[in-house]
Amino acid sequence: MAEDAILGYLAAAEEIPDSGQFASQHGLQHSEVVNVIKSLHGFRYIDAQDIKRESWVLTDEGKKYAAEGSPEVQLFLAVPQEGSISKDELQKKLQPSVFKIGCSQAGKNKWVDMGKQVSRKVQHVEDKVKDLLIRVQNGEEIGKDDVHSLKARKLIVAQTWKGYSVRKGPNYAPKRKKVATDLTRENLQRGDWKELEFKEYNFNAKGPPSESGHLHPLLKVKQQFKNIFVQMGFEEMPTNNFVESSFWNFDALFQPQQHPARDSHDTFFLEAPSTTRELPEDYVELVKRVHESGGYGSRGYMYDWKREEANKNLLRTHTTAVSTRMLYALAKQPFAPKRYFSIDRVFRNESVDRTHLAEFHQIEGLVCDRGLNLGDLIGVLDDFFSRLGMSKLRFKPAYNPYTEPSMEIFSYHEGLKKWVEIGNSGMFRPEMLLPMGFPEDVRVIAWGLSLERPTMILYGIDNIRDLFGHKVDLSLIKRNPICRIGLN
Ligand code: FB9
């Protein structure tokens, strides 16, 4: 219909200057003409150029006055030719908005005398506003000042009309040739494939969206970290137990029982099962002793260590609890150097804000070997973070109950143009390692960071709720790019 009209018209004419006029001249919907133009343009039957036209359209209020007359005229007509009418009377005769606007406009036009009593000051008035609105409605031009005053009264608004001017295209034909998109058995049998014109291959056409599963950004970044650890010869520790005993999460790490992190303000303790079933008794005895009176050159914390405190079950506050278990197990065997890592959830009863939830994923690495020192720690941190594209590191002395010395790790982030705290680290205390049974000269260097922070920075997410939790918008999961960490 519209297609034949357009192709037919161009058979005789050079161009269709304005698709809008063409549509109204051919009694066609402009929207339909536009769709056909886009399609014919796609197949290069025609060449279409955008044309834009600014026009004015009436607002709903404008339409109302065009139909019922402007409020000032409605008010004027409601005032008796002779004598006067009380303002209240007048108000009853008109709609509230008409009365309000009518008063101010008729007053401004000095048509009426607005007192307690309202009376006419002129015999006759023209409803210029209504006339102007009707002319705009009919698409007629009106004067600049009139446009300005109607716009000021929010009776008209600007509207951009978009259309096309059309000329013949390279593949122009008065009728669209049916282009074959398939060479079928029938074509071959009928032999009519010789006449057929085949559609060009559109190598840029997007294939049908493949509905498949998508990895959460956190899992993509987690995989990148795992690859780096494995490349550096680290073995993953089993972290499949969110519930831990205070013993492995705190006591075995030489963290004193009155340490603030051990109260329910920071830690989620379990109601059921509230206490752990079993602990290695001889080792517990050694941990009790080192807390109470030290040993191994330490004077300990000199307090009464309580077994029931160590028995309390909690949601682990760090994956260092897993490191403790693995190091204890390692100390049972004839000593061999070991590199371990873990990446899994930890839970902290912290105040929730833009970057903190009650749970996050901790990444931890440790190296256990004879004679290791702080230099070895800095070395392995340089190696680890350089593989993440973070080469310039700075270290700030810090404190952890289970490491001495301890260091916060900072890296200069080119993108953010600032030094970012990228983790914490230290050397596990002898009060932690020797009760496990490690030889004197065995040292363990370790460090930790979160998975959420690097993921937020890499994916440009500034609020952790957009990354993790029930408020995450699934499309983020669907359309997030691959993780290019360390792959610059
Ligand atoms: O992840 C952290 N920051 C970070 C890491 C990477 C990163 O990459 C970007 C692509 C460039 C950006 C930022 N932090 C650790 C530093 C801060 O965010 C800090 O404010 C918050 N920390 C968490 C704990 O919050 C209470 C991050 C989390 C953290 C902190 C310490 C450890 C683990 C996680 C640890 C440890 C440790 C120390 C010694 C021995 C063993 C483990």
Image (tube, rainbow, N blue to C red):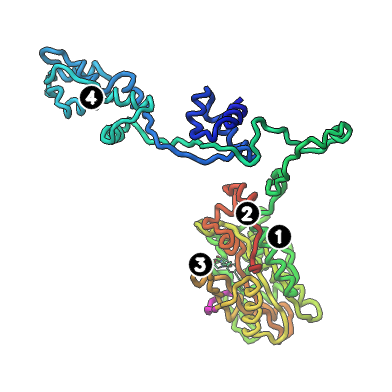
In terms of sequence position, does the residue under pointer 3 or pointer 2 come before the other? 3
Residue type marked 3:
Leu
Q: Quadrant of residue 332?
A: bottom right
* Left or right relative to 235: residue 351: left
Q: Disc 3 or 1, which lies upstream in sequence?
A: 1
Residue type at mark 2: give it. Asn
Q: Give the mark nearer the N terminus: 1 vs 2.
A: 1
Above or below, 369 against 114 in this view is below
- Residue 385: % across, % down: 63, 73
58 versus 44 height, above or below: above
Question: What secondary structure prevails in the magenta region?
Answer: strand
- Which quadrant of the figure shows ligand 1? bottom right
What is the number of the mark on residue 241?
A: 1
Give the class, few, some or many, for how many residues have Cα within 10 Å of label 1's Cα (few <14, many ≥20).
few
For marks 4 and 2, the one nearer the N-term is 4
C-alpha span from label 1 to label 2: 30 Å
Report if the beta carbon of the residue with label 2 is closer than 8 angstroms to ligand 1: no
Separation of marks 3 and 1 at Cα, in angstroms: 36 Å
Residue sitting at x 72%, y 70%: 325
Compare residues 478 and 376 and report the one nearer the observer: 478
Residue 48 counted in the magenta span:
no
Dot 2 lies on which element? loop
Q: Point out which mark residue 480 bears.
A: 2
The kind of secondary structure element at disc 1 is loop
Q: Earlier in the sequence, mark 4 or mark 1?
A: 4
Q: Verify whether residue 400 appears in magenta.
A: yes
Q: Position of residue 111 (x, y in %)?
A: 15, 23
Residue range of the region highlighted in magenta in the rendering: 394-401
Q: The N terminus is located in which quarter?
A: top right
Spatial CA distance of label 3 from label 2 is 20 Å
Residue at numbered disc 3 = 416
